[in-house]
Image: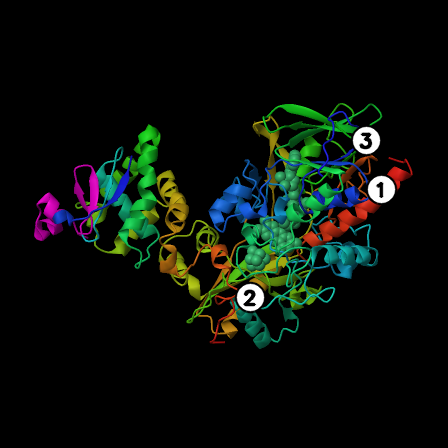
Amino acid sequence: MAAQFDLKNDGVVVIIGSGAGGGTLGNELAQKGIDVVILEAGARHEYEDFVNDEWDSFAQLAWKDKRATSGDWRVAKDFPNLPAWIVKSVGGSTTHWAGASLRFQEHEFKTLSTYGKVKGANLVDWPVTLAEMEPYYAKAEAKMGVTGTNNWPRLPGNNNFKVLKAGADKLGYKECHTGNMAINSVERDDRNSCQQTGFCFQGCKWAAKWSTLYTEIPKGEATGHLEVRPNSMVIKINHDASGKVTGVVYADKDGKLQEQKARIVAVAGNSIESPRLLLNSESSKFPHGLANSSGQVGKNYMRHTTGSVYAIFDKPVHMYRGTTMAGIIRDEARHDPSRGFVGGYEMETLSLGLPFMAAFLNPGGWGRSFTTALDHYDHMAGLWIVGEDMPREENRITLHKDEKDEHGMPIADVHFDDHANDTAMRDHAYKQGQALYAAVGATRTFPTPPYPSTHNLGTNRMSEKPADGVVNKHGQAHDIKNLFVSDGSQFTTGGAENPTLTIVSLAIRQADYIAAQMSAKSI
Amino acid sequence: MVTIYERKQPQERKLGLSRRELLKRGGAGALLIISGSAVISPEHAWGLETSALKPETMATLIQVARDIYPHDQVPDKYYAIAVKGHDETAAKDPAHKELIEKGIADLDKKAGEGGYRGLGWEEQRVALLKEIEKTPFFQAVRGGLVVSLYNQKEVWPIFGYEGESYSKGGYIARGFNDIEWL
Ligand SMILES: Cc1cc2nc3c(=O)[nH]c(=O)nc-3n(C[C@H](O)[C@H](O)[C@H](O)COP(=O)(O)OP(=O)(O)OC[C@H]3O[C@@H](n4cnc5c(N)ncnc54)[C@H](O)[C@@H]3O)c2cc1C
Ligand code: SF4
């Protein structure tokens, strides 16, 4: 039975956000018998309620509260109030996500040591190594049912994958398969196997794809130690005179302000909301926001170097049928500066339905050059580029000076400029992607610009030294012992890999640490 | 309110117009005609009634929509549905009404005698649209179309997009991997 805790109960761990980080941490703690309240800004929609329709699903699940943008990234021009495509709903962005689940490579935890100083980038090494993470990666893969691990077969390749694979073979790429996906290739965990519906981004109506919504959260609730409170938007974290956090203020479903007391607070609102909340929690003791003695809160915003390549063929493909992202080429993920940039990138199959293709293929584009592309929608194949981008202090989340949301909280301003390394990498990837499709006979290819960010990282980063970042190797604030960060904003650097497996692994690891600290009475 | 209606009987007979007259009244394209407060497509038996915008404006807007996102295989009806929201907004918001009426009037003026719809070649009309590409009028029309045109389920099959698939059991037995030409 799901627990219900009193607002005045100051023994609970309060987690803000129920996505990859928060939902996982909540269940892990509950399994250890620790009482947890997850406050989630969004509503609770169960998987039966998901809709196989891009805009309707967006309206149901996405974070649509206004945000502002600035910087030279094209998103700021095309989608000035939608810098990120992420979720506001129980389950967070794990409802929308595609399921690609990759481990970081060893050197990606040590970028400063490996790449050396990069001008205009704020690189530091993670305070964690791959060796330390491996046992947690293994636990996360087992929990999420990642294909290609634990003897679970990989998913069968769909049409879009077959085109990718044929191109990869022609270019001589060696590592191309249907990926490591947190999608059931066989029935397990009391959930269906993938039915190749092709609406992974709209929430999986078969529950074949892992999401905290119907895995971690109900499992945690079943322990009697977890309460998930939807429609609860946290706007401030309170602290006492000693600097320890004591609870959070949130707007409940009726917009009324409530205070939930807490022994520990863990922030997991994704990399725009988490720093926004810390900055908004400023006080006379912490005039620059909570946990911000380093000044790094909100800085080093990363979004992966992304882009897509779509291609048209003289024969049909029907790329939208089947699993959206089950297809990957990993050969370019290595660090090889001879290509003109540090770090690497993955190429993964991607498909959008017609409505989203129209919105994202070339935002702002019109006329026959644009429409003749869509005319051949069913003859299209597509891939997504996801590569490591450089952390920069200037790329940051700040509180908007004038505009406030319905609760009076300043909206987030998301500033991003591409680093020269990002641009060089993207150009390289566009060339490879276009060559790949040309090799299978594409008659026309489209180097498509980045979408609003789905991977948002780095804005409360981990660091060995308190001066370099916001949290330590366990996601614990350098400044405040009982305050944790549990989402992708902890990332010191982004790696080339989709981030969620790492977010989940860090949350499992953090739960062990929090439990140990609690029983040692040190927090 | 804008209503798009399917007509049971050919409009020619109802209006008592001969086909020749229709062609005359329809302007260069002879595709859409204006009658009272309605834009009518005699060829395809549908009409659109306007409430705030002039029907002539609506007819031109439909042509503008097609010139912005030209798909030769998509009938006018779907472009009409895609822009009818501007009439609804104009009915509630005088500023929007002015934006659209002025925008269209400006295009007509630029086009010279015969107006925008009188220009016979798409290239001629597109050249005018290019001139106004940066204006709030153009941005409002183009921006709205991205959703209002391409999010009509009725147009999806024209592009070969099959839409919702859960109720049909996904594609696991319906061709997710049926590509044969590789
Ligand atoms: C379309 C799409 C496809 C993706 N595909 C992949 C993929 O294939 N592989 C991969 O690794 N990653 C993928 N991602 C990214 C992945 O979803 C995210 O990296 C991951 O979910 C982030 O976890 P998180 O815990 O940081 O935040 P989220 O999962 O976004 O959860 C944050 C939650 O916190 C809530 N919240 C925020 N602020 C507050 C507040 N103040 N009070 C209360 N609640 C709050 C939000 O409503 C949200 O529910 C994809 C994302 C999208 C959108
Ligand atoms: S393709 Fe598979 S994982 Fe994706 S939504 Fe359909 S059943 Fe779920």
A290 vs B52, left or right, is: right
x and y percentages locating residue B105 in the rendered image: 25, 38
Which badge, 3 or 1, is on the more N-terminal residue?
A: 3
Whether residue B3 is visible to the viewer of this picture, yes or no, is yes
x and y percentages locating residue A6 in the rendered image: 74, 27
Q: Which mark is residue A11?
A: 3
Q: Which residues are magenta?
A: B13-42
Q: Which residue is mark 2?
A: A433
Question: Can you name the residue that lies furthest to the front here?
Answer: A1
Q: How is the image coloured?
A: rainbow
A94 vs A248, left or right, is: left
**What is the crowding at mark 3: few (fewer than 14 residues within 10 Å), some, or many (at least 20)?**
some
Q: Amino acid at mark 2?
A: Gly
x and y percentages locating residue A443 in the rendered image: 43, 70
Q: Amino acid at mark 3?
A: Gly
Most foreground residue, A281 or A199 = A199
Q: Regarding mark 2 in the picture, which secondary structure is present there?
A: helix
The chain to which mark 2 is attached is A
Query: Which residue is located at x 64 percent, y 63 percent?
Result: A185
In three-dimensional space, the C-alpha distance between marks 2 and 3, rounded to whole angstroms, equals: 53 Å
**What is the crowding at mark 1: few (fewer than 14 residues within 10 Å), some, or many (at least 20)?**
some
